[in-house]
């Protein structure tokens, strides 16, 4: 499995392997997808194991792929000037989309970094495979993007929870 | 909004629908309708089934999130929006703003609550409309869902930015962070890059405001969206600037008043201006039923220090708690501003003296007295002058406000021990004025970030406690043991009220 940031990666996944359509169909995100689309996606997907602390994608890099968690835990980090990387949430649910929703909208840049909180297994799906499916069946594209939107919505809820748990600034702010 | 053309115009103005083909917009314009919400009415409510998508046509809405399991406050509750379990609300007033995107995404439950802050018109588009049209026109459906992703992404970015703002409280830095996150799409020549610099200094805040308004109207797509987001983020900053300007105007009104204007008239005008200022803040007033029917009494209150943000360029700070009691409680009840007892200015406090000299306040002297400036140098002479002036005012049916601590402190340390002057005054005058306790809280905080409280308590008739001829020692003991002891409880109760807990006298007046 290649990481999207090429030579600047902090860790390389081990045992990069292929993925079957059946494996994909077992993930909630891919439920209800027609067989031909699953075959197409599985044909370009790779599965890899990342060590604890490995960076999967980096904020602002070109979003060339979407990542789904099979096992482990992935952190969502956002960099703020003068503050550093802020943890916005941790995704542990197998099958969840952990990185790459920005691959579906301009300017196609990751809006956050994804880091493995523990050794994790992920599936990588290239953007162009999705785009090919969208072109072939736009309504299926509409339905897939609805699932992506739902995943981003979950992430937003996570950010809001963090907002609650953050104490408000003292008076001098 | 009455015509389909107007609906179409609104959709075209909305950043969410920007770039969509006219035939699609016309389809939605045919099926949309306008709904009007009165101030305080919910547009959407967090957790409810999300069946419709809205576009702001006219008015203002307040968006907030509540933590799961926390009941949302009813609009008329006194607790204010910043109660436990709620994020900082933000107010949105730009036409075309989309609300209720959760209707387009599973599980179709609203993620936020939107409450109209004034009479507000929203364009309503049912969820089924988009679903059916996406099926009919899959090419549109795909493009539409990319737009939904764009919208949720903006919300995600904005929420994260607000997280940083809440954690670090540095507005210019927060705006920089927002710009950085949009670096991939924002032109390096955009005037938006100037905003963080403008925000560094209070004198250039107006420039920031003007630039943002200009870009909201005529920037490119990215600039318009970012300018709107930054404006929302800065809502509190603009409110602080407005308060500061109002304080400056009040000072100028008093210090620059023509010599022919009477202190009473000037006092009244300044109190009216203060009332305007306080009406724009969150406050709670309780116990007004305890106010005597007629004026001519002594109102004693704890005195809170001032927030340094209210420091005027001449180093003068207008006290807020006493002006609140004067303008929002006493002026409203009696139609006349009370006389206040204030300390005589120290040498060099030109702003202080210039202001209070004009208002006909009664001075008390603490520490230094310039013998060339004031011939009444003996303490007895000064005490006599204070009593005589106050007595005359009371007999003429004017109220007097006194802070018996003789100094000010923070809410958390208030009240400090009381001096007995106010009570001596009450015991020496016939007909005997009542002493009316008023406890205040949070006037030492930023007005934009707190709920201020003033609670009027049952008046004290000293003769009922101490008899007709009051002994100084008995009075001192009464003030220290009885009055001060109770007042400590009164202030704690005011703090609890501000925090949203109930208690104390009934009959609330609450800001909206």
Image (cartoon, coloured by chain):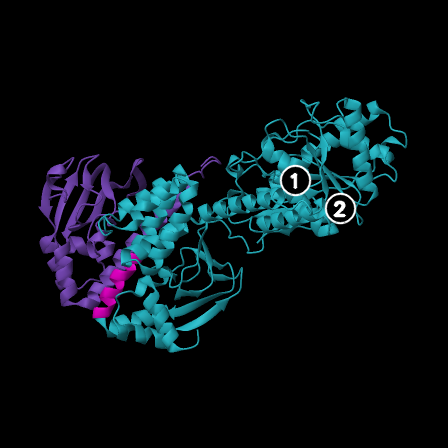
Residue A88 versus residue B315 in the image, above or below:
below
Rendered image quadrant of residue B307: top right
Closer to us: A103 or B265? B265
Assess disc 2: are there few (<14), some (14-19) or many (≥20) residues with their C-alpha within 10 Å of its C-alpha. some
- On the question of residue A153 being in view, the answer is no
Residue displayed at 28% across by 59% down: B221
Question: Eyeballing the image, is B219 above or below B284?
Answer: below
**Residue named by callout 1:** B322
The structure residue drawn at horizontal position 16% and vertical position 67%, both measured from the top left corner, is: A137
Name the residue beneath numbered marker 2: B290
Residue A83 percent location from the top left of the image = 31, 35
Q: In this view, does B50 lie to the left or right of A80?
A: right
- Which stretch did the figure color magenta? B139-151
Task: State the residue in front, B410 or B83.
Answer: B410
Q: Which of marks 1 and 2 is in front?
A: 1
Residue B335 — which label? Answer: none
* Image position, residue A59 (x, y; %): 22, 43
- Magenta region, main secondary structure: helix
From mark 1 to mark 2, how far is it between C-alphas? 18 Å
Name the side, left or right, on which A139 lies relative to B228: left
Q: The purple chain is which one?
A: A
User: Which of the chains bears the disc numbered 2?
Assistant: B
């Amino acid at each position: 499995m290649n990481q999207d940031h090429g030579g600047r990666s902090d860790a390389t996944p081990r045992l990069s392997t292929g993925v079957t359509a059946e494996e994909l169909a077992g993930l909630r995100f891919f439920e209800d997808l027609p067989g031909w689309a699953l075959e197409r996606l599985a044909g370009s997907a790779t599965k890899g194991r990342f060590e604890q602390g490995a960076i999967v994608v980096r904020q602002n890099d070109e979003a060339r792929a979407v990542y789904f968690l099979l096992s482990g835990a992935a952190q969502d980090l956002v960099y703020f000037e003068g503050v550093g990387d802020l943890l916005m949430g941790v995704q542990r649910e197998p099958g969840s989309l952990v990185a790459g929703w920005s691959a579906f909208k301009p300017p196609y840049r990751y809006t956050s970094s994804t880091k493995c909180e523990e050794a994790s297994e992920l599936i990588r799906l290239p953007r162009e495979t999705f785009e090919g499916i969208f072109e072939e069946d736009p309504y299926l594209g509409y339905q897939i993007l609805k699932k992506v939107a739902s995943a981003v919505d979950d992430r937003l809820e996570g950010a809001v929870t963090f907002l609650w748990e953050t104490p408000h600034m003292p008076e001098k702010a | 909004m009455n015509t389909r053309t107007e609906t179409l115009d609104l959709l075209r103005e909305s950043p969410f629908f920007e770039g969509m083909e006219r035939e699609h917009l016309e389809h939605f314009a045919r099926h949309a309708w306008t709904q009007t919400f009165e101030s305080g009415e919910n547009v959407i409510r967090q957790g409810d089934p999300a069946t419709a998508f809205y576009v702001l046509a006219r008015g203002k809405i307040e968006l907030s999130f509540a933590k799961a399991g926390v009941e949302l406050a009813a609009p008329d509750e006194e607790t204010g929006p910043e109660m436990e379990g709620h994020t900082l609300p933000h107010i949105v007033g730009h036409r075309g703003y989309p609300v209720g995107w959760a209707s387009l995404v599973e599980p179709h439950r609203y993620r936020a609550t939107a409450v109209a802050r004034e009479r507000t018109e929203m364009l309503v588009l049912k969820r089924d409309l988009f679903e059916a049209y996406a099926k009919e026109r899959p090419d549109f459906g795909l493009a539409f869902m990319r737009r939904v992703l764009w919208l949720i992404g903006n919300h995600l970015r904005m929420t994260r930015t607000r997280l940083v703002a809440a954690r670090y409280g540095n507005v210019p830095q927060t705006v920089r962070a927002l710009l950085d996150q949009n670096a991939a799409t924002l032109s390096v020549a955009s005037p938006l890059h100037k905003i963080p610099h403008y925000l560094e200094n209070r004198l250039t805040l107006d420039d920031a405001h003007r630039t943002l308004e200009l870009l909201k109207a005529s920037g490119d797509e990215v600039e318009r969206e970012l300018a709107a987001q930054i404006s929302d983020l800065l809502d509190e900053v603009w409110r602080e600037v407005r308060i500061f300007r109002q304080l400056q105007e009040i000072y100028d009104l008093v210090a620059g008043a023509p010599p022919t204007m009477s202190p009473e008239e000037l006092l009244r005008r300044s109190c009216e201006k203060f009332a305007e200022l306080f009406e724009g803040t969150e406050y709670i007033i309780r116990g007004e039923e305890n106010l005597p029917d007629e004026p001519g009494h002594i109102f004693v209150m704890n005195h809170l220090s001032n927030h340094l943000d209210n420091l005027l360029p001449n180093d003068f700070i207008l006290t807020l708690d006493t002006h609140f009691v004067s303008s929002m409680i006493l002026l409203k009840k009696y139609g006349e501003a009370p006389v206040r007892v204030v300390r005589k200015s120290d040498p060099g406090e030109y702003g202080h003296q210039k202001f209070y000299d004009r208002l006909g306040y009664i001075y008390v002297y603490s520490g230094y007295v310039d013998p060339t400036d004031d011939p009444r140098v003996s303490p007895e002479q000064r005490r006599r002058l204070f009593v005589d002036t106050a007595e005359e005012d009371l007999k003429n049916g004017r109220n007097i406000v006194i802070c018996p601590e003789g100094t000010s402190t923070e809410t958390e340390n208030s009240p400090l021990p009381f001096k007995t002057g106010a009570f001596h005054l009450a015991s020496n005058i016939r007909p005997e004025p009542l002493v009316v306790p008023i406890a205040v809280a949070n006037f030492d905080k930023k007005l934009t970030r707190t709920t201020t409280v003033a609670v009027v308590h049952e008046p004290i008739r000293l003769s009922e406690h101490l008899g007709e001829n009051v002994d100084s020692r008995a009075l001192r003991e009464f003030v220290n043991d009885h009055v001060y002891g109770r007042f400590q409880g009164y202030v704690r109760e005011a703090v609890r009220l501000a925090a949203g807990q109930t208690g104390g006298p009934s009959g609330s007046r609450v800001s909206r």
